[in-house]
Amino acid sequence: MPPSDWSALPLFPLPRGAQVVDGAAFVRGEIDSGRCKAAPQPDGGHVVAPVAVLIGEQGAIARIVPRAIGCATIEQYTVGYVQSLVRGGPGAVVPAPGWYRLAVSYRW
């Protein structure tokens, strides 16, 4: 498991040219349907889903742990989204082994 204080973790370096796919429609749909207790940020119009990413010895993702935000479907959607962003490809950055943090902000 990641350390309890995620703020001490370094930011995960996203690959250059990472394809950012808008998942806001899915996230908003989960909230609007009442299936989730996750609330938009106080300024409205977006939800932040933090994750901790563990990089193994070979530079591959060993684990992604979502922080609980009151909606398991958004948390798991975010895990899949982060996996797709950091899988490699052109401009991929392979950070040193260890835990990193990343927060995905879904805006609408």
Image (tube, rainbow, N blue to C red):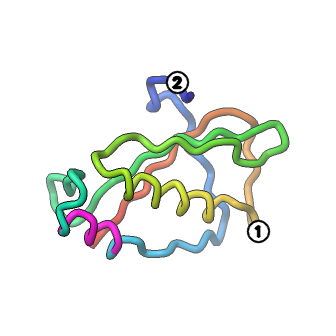
Residue at the image position 82 percent from the left and 37 percent from the top: 57
Q: Is residue 98 magenta?
A: no
Residue beneath disc 2: 3
SS for callout 2: loop
User: Quadrant of the rendered structure where residue 54 is?
Assistant: top right
Question: Relative to residue 43, is residue 98 depicted above or below?
Answer: above
In the image, residue 90 lies at what x, y percent?
A: 76, 70
User: Quadrant of the rendered structure where residue 40 is?
Assistant: bottom left
Observer-nearest of 77 and 52: 77
Image quadrant holding the N terminus, namely: top right
Mark closest to the chain's N terminus, 2 or 1: 2
Label 2: few (<14), some or many (≥20) within 10 Å? few
User: Quadrant of the rendered structure where residue 74 is?
Assistant: bottom left
Spatial CA distance of label 2 from label 1 is 29 Å
Residue at the image position 29 percent from the left and 57 percent from the top: 47
Residue beneath disc 1: 89
Question: Relative to residue 79, is residue 59 depicted above or below?
Answer: above
Observer-nearest of 58 and 15: 58
Looking at the image, residue 7 sits to the left or right of residue 69; the answer is right
Looking at the image, residue 38 sits to the left or right of residue 86; the answer is left
Image quadrant holding the C terminus, namely: bottom left
Q: Which residues, given as a range, are shown in magenta?
A: 26-32
Looking at the image, residue 87 sits to the left or right of residue 69; the answer is right
Observer-nearest of 70 and 107: 70
Predominant SS along the magenta part: helix
In the image, residue 14 lies at what x, y percent?
A: 61, 57
Question: Relative to residue 11, is residue 93 depicted above or below?
Answer: below
Residue at the image position 61 percent from the left and 63 percent from the top: 85
In the image, residue 65 lies at what x, y percent?
A: 52, 41
Question: Relative to residue 15, is residue 90 depicted above or below?
Answer: below
Task: Report the amino acid beneath label 1.
Answer: Gly
Observer-nearest of 1 and 13: 1
